[in-house]
Image (cartoon, rainbow, N blue to C red):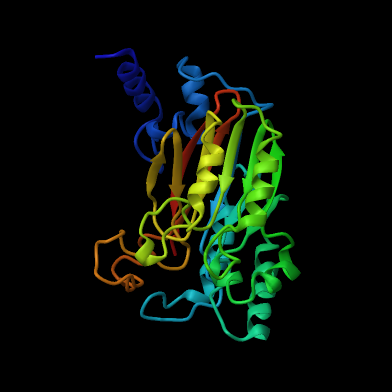
Amino acid sequence: MTKNELDRRKFLKLVGLGGGVVFASGLGIYPRVAKAAASEAGLLSTNSDSDFYFVQLSDTHFGFNNPLVNPNSDKTLLMAVDAVNALEEQPDFIMFTGDLTDSTNDDQERRRRLGSFKNIVSQLKCPMVKFMPGEHDAALDKGAAYKEFFGDTFYAFDYKGIHFVVVDNVSDPLGIIGADQLVWLKTTLSKFGPNDPIVVFTHRPLFPLNPRWDWWTADGQQAIDMLMPFTNVSVFYGHIHQNYTFATGHIPHYSARSTMFALPVSGSVPVKKQIPWDPAHPYEGLGYREVDAVPAKPSYTAQEFPLQS
């Protein structure tokens, strides 16, 4: 038995297997909720000045209405807000990775939904909340209404030593990043060192997970090529409504569950469609995630939380 295996057993014995603790060894470190126990065991050194965590919420689809898929769709966003507000320790920031609202061809209704969404999430206790559009928010008007409520569709920010880059691969109706934004991305990345920690947020996957289902970005490989020279890059995205991990070279890509409805595993059915509501297992497959960040390593741990009634 290796030292890592012994350490993992010691860690699990300390924190137990209950309480929703997920040991996400593939992401590199121990979950935030067990950090104190891990530190006590000598398995993890912490730095409260730099370590932090954020919450990723995705695909809330406010305005969605199909009782066969989610009979409580009008309450689901409020449930997600209440769940995050109930966390014992509030996150440093919250990131919504697109499809804030459900699609509508009515420009006025689109703005009504975006406004209502913004009003509801203003109840979040966390003072720092970030947004990006999904194709349901922005593809029909190239992000015009979204920008009225939330500003730029792509941007970058730094937090405690990590560079966060938000890439818009939905506002163009072709589902691409586009030449102008790729120039912006190249310029933004040129300011970073080769070993700097970088986290990229997108809505669609950058890689061709399933082009037939629109689970890809047509020019996403250009963005991946720009990121490849950097040694510490992670990508978090939404769109596919489920947890899925994939790597392009040394770059891991992590998808998030939806808070509104689940979708099938890629290629598991002939036609992509929403998974029907199961009264025996309400909200199955729905949820959000916390991500622990340790900039000094750099490393990230995802802890998944179900959306429950």
Q: Quadrant of residue 92?
A: top right
* Residue at screen point 70% across, 72% down: 144
> Total number of numbered labels?
0
Residue 237 seen in the figure: yes
Query: Residue 127 appears at what percent x and percent y?
Result: 73, 50
Identify the image quadrant of the N terminus.
top left
Identify the image quadrant of the C terminus.
bottom left
Would residue 179 be found to the left or right of residue 38 on screen? right
Would residue 170 be found to the left or right of residue 305 on screen? right
Q: Nearer the viewer, residue 207 or 65?
A: 207
Query: Residue 86 appears at what percent x and percent y?
Result: 58, 52
Would residue 79 be found to the left or right of residue 286 on screen? right
Relative height, residue 121 to residue 49 (above, below): below
* Residue at screen point 57% across, 84% down: 105
Q: Nearer the viewer, residue 85 or 226?
A: 226
* Residue at screen point 31% across, 72% down: 279
Q: Nearer the viewer, residue 48 or 250?
A: 250
* Residue at screen point 47% across, 14% down: 42
Relative height, residue 36 to residue 210 (above, below): above
Query: Residue 173 appears at what percent x and percent y?
Result: 56, 71
Relative height, residue 304 to residue 261 (above, below): above
